[in-house]
Amino acid sequence: MIRALFVAGADAFRINMSHGNHEDHAARIAAIRALEKEYGRPTTILGDLQGPKLRVGTFARGLAVLKTGACFILDRDEKPGDAKRANLPHPEIYAALVPETRLLLDDGKLVLRVKAVSDDRIETVVEVGGALSNRKGVNVPDVVVPVPALTDKDRRDLAFAIEQGLDWIALSFVQRPEDLAEARRLMGGHGALMAKIEKPSAVQRLEEILELSDGVMVARGDLGVELPPQAVPPLQKQIVATARRMGRPVVVATQMLESMIKAPTPTRAEVSDVATAVYDGADAIMLSAETAAGDWPQEAVAMMDSIAHSVERDPGYFARLHFTETQPDATTADALAEGAGGIVSVVGASAITCYTTSGSTVRRVARERPLVSILALTPRLDTARKLGLTWGVHAVRTKDVGNFEEMIGKARRMALRHGMVEKGGKIVVLAGVPFGTPGSTNVLHVATIRGDELKGRE
């Protein structure tokens, strides 16, 4: 099935650490990596940490019905709860709450308003009632809860992810820039760090969080619980635009083709939602339950892929993309990255071929959203894998070059081999001299394809 999803159009795979065990995950990771040998293309894997999930305790009868307008107590007593009280085993919440703040239970289905709070007791009024069962989640949207960004389980999962060589680590429930520090330290330079934006407090400090992360995910599930639904679309656009300006890959996720969990085709509204994310300039669009537990996983991936292709064929697509202004930094690499897009337009080039060690220059080129695809050539497999979440990039692991003539020759051959240009077409080549030196991009060259570059090399 993993192979079928790859063939249907999946560029990256997410390992959800909230479910399963390390043995199960290792088997799936091995299956994903096997695709590299079969197709000769780097595969991208994102390890998604569970994060500090806040939950109520248990109930004597398995559930209790909370009536709107009634008083409901949350306390530190581990005794099973009923319709009047329940256990809440998180001292951090007691410390953070003040009267009139809200508690959202079971993905926001129930709403409590805090009336009084002490070190071990929270008195609330039920504003929206309903059935509450064992260990349902608790969201605290109105205050920053001083919980650590990483739980003990997250640390174990992170160590496993690093051992398995996962390319991206997603940190859940980021509230402030400081939350990224421990994960970054434990990663020890391995993989790239993605901040999941699913808390209102994170949106308020978005640029600071992006500054310390390698990428960002618009996690609309919890964001839509803690905020009114109508507040999420403007925030999605804000997060995508900010990430693009700062040159960080941005993923839009959650409920994108939700109806395809059970149905072979999506609703028109879902198609429009996915298309909007592509029009906004997202680097990646992500499926969750549709492929993890749905009845139509291949069809969901194929539909997502076809929506993206349809949008990108729209003559107005690139004009919409460039509503977001991306000001270059005062560096040679940024000047060349911005210039490459303009040269593509003027000379009608078919692709931008970019030599890279760390992936930095490729990300700067992608930030400008050029009219053509970007072929990233790198000697580092980890760099090629990480670039799987970057807009418009087809990454290839290949030996480094030693001189200018070799650089141009290999760029021509690779562009032909990977179907990005035809005989007589042009490519824009970006590289750095001296060759093999990270961060030295200082060469831009336009090359014309003769058509015989692959003779004797098949």
Image (spheres, grey):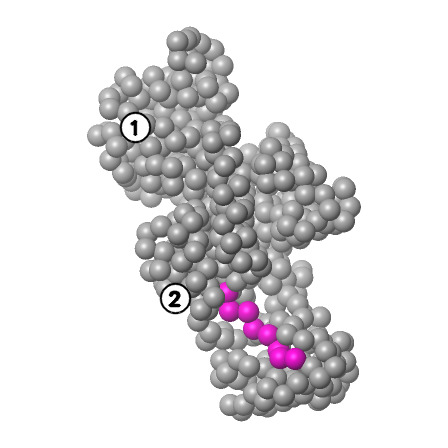
Please give left or right for residue 325 compared with residue 219 in the image: left
Q: Quadrant of the N terminus?
A: top right
Residue topped by disc 1: 400
Q: Which is nearer the eye, 379 or 79?
A: 79
User: Can residue 450 be seen from the camera position used here?
Assistant: no
Q: In the structure shown, which secondary structural element does the residue marked by tag 1 occupy?
A: loop
Q: Which is nearer the eye, 336 or 298?
A: 298
Q: In the structure shown, which secondary structural element does the residue marked by tag 2 occupy?
A: loop
Please give left or right for residue 450 compared with residue 103 in the image: left
Distance, label 1 to label 2, CA atoms, is: 37 Å
Q: Main secondary structure of the magenta part?
A: loop
**Magenta segment boundaries in residue numbering:** 51-58
Counting from the top left corner in percent of width and height, residue 325 is at 46, 43
Q: Callout 1, which amino acid?
A: Asp
Name the residue located 49 percent from the left edge and 80 percent from the top edge: 92
Q: Is residue 56 magenta?
A: yes
Q: Quadrant of the C terminus?
A: top left
Counting from the top left corner in percent of width and height, residue 112 is at 67, 80
The outermost residue toward the left is 434
Q: Is residue 207 above or below residue 347?
A: below
Counting from the top left corner in percent of width and height, residue 450 is at 41, 9
Q: Which mark is residue 178?
A: 2
Q: Residues within 10 Å of mark 1 (few under 14, many from 20)?
A: some
Please give left or right for residue 319 compared with residue 229 in the image: left
Q: Callout 2, which amino acid?
A: Glu
Instruction: Mark 1 or mark 2: name the one nearer the start of the chain.
Output: 2
Q: Depth-wise, is mark 1 or mark 2 nearer the camera? A: 1
